[in-house]
Amino acid sequence: MPQDERKPVFWNEQLVGYVEDLSVDNFHLYGKWTPAKSKEGEAFLEMLRADEYNNDIWVGFGENKPMYNLASLPDRNIDVRMLPNPPAKW
């Protein structure tokens, strides 16, 4: 994944934001987070703020399929883990 490219972030088949300036550190990807200005983007952030996710949120960077496990709540940056065996579908 090119690091200077802005990538859409998907959750439950919905566009919820964008990541750019990606960096890789072992099994983590992180970059600047910009939430989508949409109902879906707001629902994603509200769910995270309410702590309803129990550290089991999978997102897709650039592709609408679950690929990465959310490592921390997105604020200015988003951090995800590359784990083996992501779910086959949302």
Image (cartoon, rainbow, N blue to C red):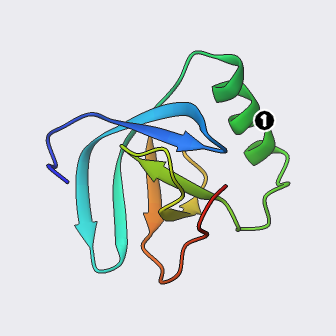
Amino acid carrying label 1: it is: Glu
Left or right for 64, reference 49: left
| Residue 75 showing in the rendered view | no
Q: Quadrant of residue 42?
A: top right
- The front one of 76 and 56 is 56
Which residue carries the number 1 mark? Answer: 46
* Picture residue at 57% right of the left edge, 60% below the top: 72
Q: Quadrant of residue 12?
A: top right
* Picture residue at 47% right of the left edge, 51% below the top: 60
Q: Quadrant of residue 90?
A: bottom right
Q: Position of residue 34 (x, y in %)?
A: 44, 30
Left or right for 46, reference 87: right
Say if 34 sits above or below 33 in the image.
Answer: above
Q: Residues within 10 Å of mark 1 (few under 14, many from 20)?
A: few
* Picture residue at 47% right of the left edge, 40% below the top: 9
Q: Position of residue 64 (x, y in %)?
A: 49, 44
At mark 1, the secondary structure is helix
- The front one of 57 and 77 is 57
| Residue 57 showing in the rendered view | yes
* Picture residue at 48% right of the left edge, 64% below the top: 68
